[in-house]
Image (tube, rainbow, N blue to C red):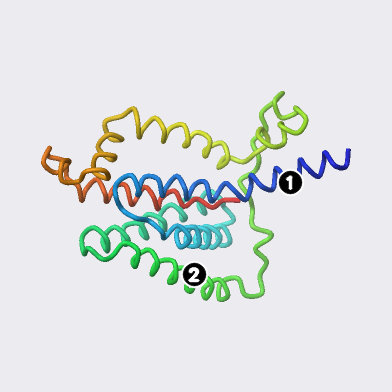
Amino acid sequence: MNNLNFFSDYLIATLRLAVPLAFAALGGLYSERAGVLNIALEGMLLTGAFTSAVATFYTSNPWLGILASLISGGLVGLLHAVLCITLRVEQLVSGLAINLVAAGLTSFFARLVFSGSSTQQLPGIGAIIIPGLANIPLIGPLLFQKDFLVYLLFILVILTTYILFKTSFGLTLRAVGESPKAADTSGISVPFVRYIAVVISFLLSLRGE
């Protein structure tokens, strides 16, 4: 029984830690499909986590923390898009620079903001318990007693698959990434589509454990 409890706790912790990485991976998918290399995922996660923690710390409202994460992620994504698409900076260099700047700034400001304070007491979103299914041994606590972001991730995985392969926007996105010259010839604004893809990529910087 102890082994089963340990295994259950291990799976729950694994899923909890994997959620932010999965959001970042989904975001990177949009950017890569549009033909923009995005290695700034680490900087995206750091920025989203820091702004979310700060907003939640001062407002005691985790939903405002998520909103702050979305805004900061969108702004960093816009910066990356301007550098890579408009100014034609090397995409690898831009992503690397964002990672380094984000790592330095979030570490510095975290010391200023949270000096002498404990972030362990930040309010969480709260788990959504699905009646009946939550009582299933092992699977129930793993999948059906989670917060909003976990369920949102499952929905976004399905929705992203549908968008990329079943919609005109997904077709346009893939066309821009695979053959930008052909897409431009057909009347598609390649820079505009790439801007949208990169901003979406950084918007998915949710970090709301």
Q: Quadrant of residue 171?
A: top left
**Quadrant where the N terminus lies?**
top right
Left or right, 112 with respect to 138, comes to left
Mark 1–mark 2 CB contact (< 8 Å):
no
Residue 199 to residue 188: above or below: below
Q: Secondary structure at mark 2?
A: helix
The residue at 49%/47% (across/down) is 23
- 1 or 2: tag closer to the N-terminus: 1
- Label 2 Cα neighbours within 10 Å, binned few <14 / some 14-19 / many ≥20: some
In front: 205, or 55? 205
Left or right, 102 with respect to 1, comes to left
Q: Quadrant of residue 84?
A: bottom left
Q: Position of residue 117 (x, y in %)?
A: 66, 70
Q: Secondary structure at mark 1?
A: helix
Label 2: which residue?
103
Label 1: which residue?
10
Q: Quadrant of residue 86?
A: bottom left
Number of numbered discs on residues? 2
The residue at 50%/33% (across/down) is 155
Image depth: mark 1 or mark 2 in front: 1
Q: Position of residue 109 (x, y in %)?
A: 51, 73
Q: Return the mark for residue 115.
A: none
Q: Position of residue 118 (x, y in %)?
A: 68, 66
